[in-house]
């Protein structure tokens, strides 16, 4: 009976693994197709002959993007935005979540602040009031316009707060008896014990700041100050205009190799590379951080 039960359990596990593998492969198909399109000739793309492998291999779309000085400027702006946004998000979220993890007797007015946070998360000020505030502060065409409006993600505060609630109270009490200040308790006990949830909100911050393009369209009016995603979204190549501007046969040949579909595919491939490099480093903490930060004991 035990042997039969073991065989059934193994068979069930194998079936589950096969289903998950099939889903993973299915998710890879669109990415492989986009990658193949970015390296395929314009004629092959237009005639829908591109599948999972390039047809008429060419690097013209990548050459067009990589030789664009504004592309690299926008790339640098996005990297700086991610770095500053991550630092500000982490500091403000942790500093807010720590007092919010206390009881109402320890932190007077805690419930009032909690209700305000929930209300603000459900009912924000809206796009126009936010734009007016940013404009009045003089942040238009500034990097701070892309960072400060989302400096304190309330969902992340709640995740970290619930994770802090799961840390044994005895650790904090022992540290306070030994003479530690609340700031020392936070930095030396709560933060080191909260690596999973901190890695989770770090991943949220990185992905959110890197992928956002609408903030650039809303607050940035000068193309030279566009972050990468805004620049890529607004970038369009008119083959006819390029042909008119070309003065030699070589230039005409290069222009003819570039189609809008090729260029758009190349944009997508380049834009996901940084996230593909960062995600594996933080992925192991993601599930633990979300689960432990979402459930209050």
Image (tube, helix red, strand yellow):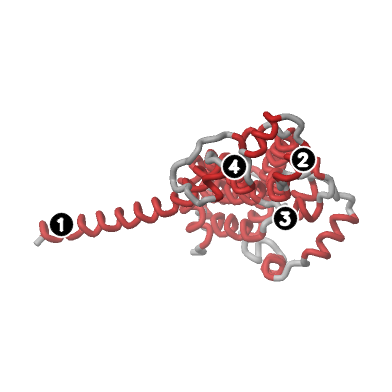
Instruction: Please tell me which of labels 3 and 4 falls first in the chain.
Output: 3
Q: Give the quarter of the image for residue 248.
A: top right
Q: Regarding mark 2 in the picture, which secondary structure is present there? A: helix
Picture disc at residue 189: none
Q: Give the quarter of the image for residue 270.
A: top right
Q: Identify the residue position indicated by label 2 in the image.
A: 244
Q: Give the quarter of the image for residue 162.
A: bottom right
Q: Regarding mark 3 in the picture, which secondary structure is present there? A: helix
Q: Identify the residue position indicated by label 1 in the image.
A: 7
Q: Regarding mark 4 in the picture, which secondary structure is present there? A: helix
Q: Regarding mark 1 in the picture, which secondary structure is present there? A: helix
Residue 28 position in % (x across, y down): 44, 49
Residue 30 position in % (x across, y down): 48, 51
Picture disc at residue 266: 4
Q: Identify the residue position indicated by label 3 in the image.
A: 214
Real-space Cα separation, disc 4 to disc 1, in angstroms: 48 Å
Which of discs 2 and 4 lies nearer the camera? The answer is 2
Asked if labels 4 and 3 touch by Cβ distance under 8 angstroms, the answer is: no
Residue 291 position in % (x across, y down): 48, 58
Residue 176 visible at all: no
């Amino acid at each position: 009976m035990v042997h039969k039960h073991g065989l059934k359990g193994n068979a069930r596990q194998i079936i589950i693994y096969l289903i998950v593998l099939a889903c993973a492969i299915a998710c890879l198909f669109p990415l492989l197709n986009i990658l193949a399109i970015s390296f395929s000739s314009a004629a092959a793309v237009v005639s829908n002959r591109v599948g999972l492998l390039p047809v008429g291999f060419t690097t013209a779309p990548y050459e067009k993007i990589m030789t664009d000085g504004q592309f690299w400027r926008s790339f640098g702006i996005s990297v700086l935005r991610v770095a500053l946004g991550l630092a500000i998000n982490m500091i403000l979220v942790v500093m807010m979540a720590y007092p919010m993890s206390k009881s109402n007797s320890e932190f007077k007015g805690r419930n009032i602040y909690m209700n305000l946070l929930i209300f603000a998360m459900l009912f924000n000020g809206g796009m126009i009031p936010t734009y007016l505030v940013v404009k009045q502060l003089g942040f238009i065409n500034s990097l701070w316009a892309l960072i400060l409006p989302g400096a304190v993600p309330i969902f992340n505060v709640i995740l970290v707060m619930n994770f802090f609630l799961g840390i044994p109270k005895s650790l904090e009490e022992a540290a306070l008896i030994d003479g530690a200040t609340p700031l020392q308790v936070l930095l030396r006990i709560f933060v080191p014990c909260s690596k999973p949830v901190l890695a989770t909100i770090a991943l949220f911050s990185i992905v959110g700041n890197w992928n956002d393009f609408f903030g650039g369209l809303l607050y940035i009016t000068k193309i030279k100050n566009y972050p990468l995603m805004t620049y890529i979204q607004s970038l369009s190549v008119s083959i006819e205009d390029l042909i008119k501007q070309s003065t030699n046969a070589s230039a005409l040949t290069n222009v003819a190799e570039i189609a809008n579909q090729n260029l758009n595919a190349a944009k997508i491939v380049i834009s996901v590379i940084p996230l593909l490099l960062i995600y594996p480093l933080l992925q192991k903490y993601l599930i633990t951080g979300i689960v432990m930060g979402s459930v209050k004991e």
